[in-house]
Amino acid sequence: MKRDPTNANTLREALMLLSLNRLKGKRHTFLCGDAGPLAIGIHLNHLLGNSEQVDLLCSKLKSLSQDVVNVQSDLPNEYLYGRAGYLYAILYVNKYVMPQKFDDEFVRLIIEAILVSGRNLSKAFSFKCPLMYEWHESYYLGAAHGVSGILYLLLQVKQYLPDDDLLNLIKPTIDYLTTQRFPSGNFPSSLGRDVDRYVQWCHGAPGFVYLFCEAYKVFHDPKYLQLASECGDVIWERGLLKKGYSICHGVAGNAYCFLELYQSTKEPKHLYRAIKFAEWCFDYNKEHEELSPDRPLSLYEGLAGRLYLYLDIQKPAEAKFPGFTL
């Protein structure tokens, strides 16, 4: 799809790989649930001109929203398994399929559920920020399971948010997160965790690069770009990981952070750093990977993510972290 979105044979092969008849109906998100295959299936069928199939899959995708818009459900809000992951799937379809299949009112219902859930938790436990989110009884901060990933997605679609939400909910929460930094410039994986250990997209400074770069674009405050750059320095110093090459918790994901910084600052050093991390991934060596991934061919844990990076780095101004950046 990425290399040749107009080749019908390639699109049909990709459609077969989705195995849409084998969806499990257990999860709602783009990366770890039914919403992802459905969203990509909609995109592929749209490119192939299969309008009836597009409408059918859109109906199936929308049918997953019952638990998402119900703030009383036990659905979390994070990217991998929660409301943010479902919202990404809806926004993905709206980006690539015209005319848009999901109206603004439906998108706002999902966003409102995320905001209400965050406000309710913050008030219930008297947090010092307007929004807070919980996953597995921890208050995660990183991109995959935590506040920074949720807020990053919301900032990407600021057109759906009134200024009151941006200025009185999202911005103060971002500013609160900046107070949680370690002296090293890294961030904890969750509130109350004082171990300065993780420097990977899912936990730690790498995920915050995206939040701060997007906050700079929305609020035009240079402090956010400075924070993003400082996170980049942490990644450069500590981001060659023994966990291996993945984009979720490996070096390929950290390389993507430098591409984001390059796009936001236009500073060549960030592109240089991205290339060097990508070169490290090219030099495949089992010594770089203490444990084999559970899913060694997958996008977020395995080979597919590295290949995606290799394609993206050829056009660094257009690179997007897959499944995270719209």
Image: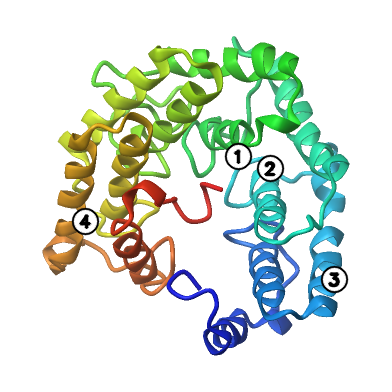
Mark 1 vs mark 4: in front: 4
Distance CA(mark 2)–CA(mark 3) = 28 Å
Q: Quadrant of residue 266?
A: top left
Q: Nearer the viewer, residue 286 or 313?
A: 313
Q: Which residue is mark 3?
A: 55
Residue 76 locus on image (x, y percent): 68, 42
In the rendered structure, which amino acid carries the disc numbered 3?
A: Asp
Distance CA(mark 1)–CA(mark 4) = 32 Å
User: Cβ–Cβ below 8 Å for labels 1 and 4?
Assistant: no
Distance CA(mark 4)–CA(mark 2) = 33 Å
Mark 4 vs mark 2: in front: 4
In the rendered structure, which amino acid carries the disc numbered 1?
A: Trp
Q: Which residue is mark 4?
A: 278
Residue 299 locus on image (x, y percent): 44, 65
Q: Nearer the viewer, residue 225 or 129?
A: 225
Q: Secondary structure at mark 2?
A: loop
Residue 317's place in the image compared with 205, above or below, is below
User: Cβ–Cβ below 8 Å for labels 3 and 4?
Assistant: no
Mark before the other along the chain sequence, 3 or 4: 3
Distance CA(mark 1)–CA(mark 3) = 33 Å
Q: Which residue is mark 1?
A: 135
In the rendered structure, which amino acid carries the disc numbered 4?
A: Ala
In the rendered structure, which amino acid carries the disc numbered 2?
A: Pro
User: Cβ–Cβ below 8 Å for labels 1 and 2?
Assistant: yes
Q: Secondary structure at mark 3?
A: helix
- For residue 76, the mark is 2
Q: Residues within 10 Å of mark 3 (few under 14, many from 20)?
A: some
Residue 239's place in the image compared with 65, above or below, is above
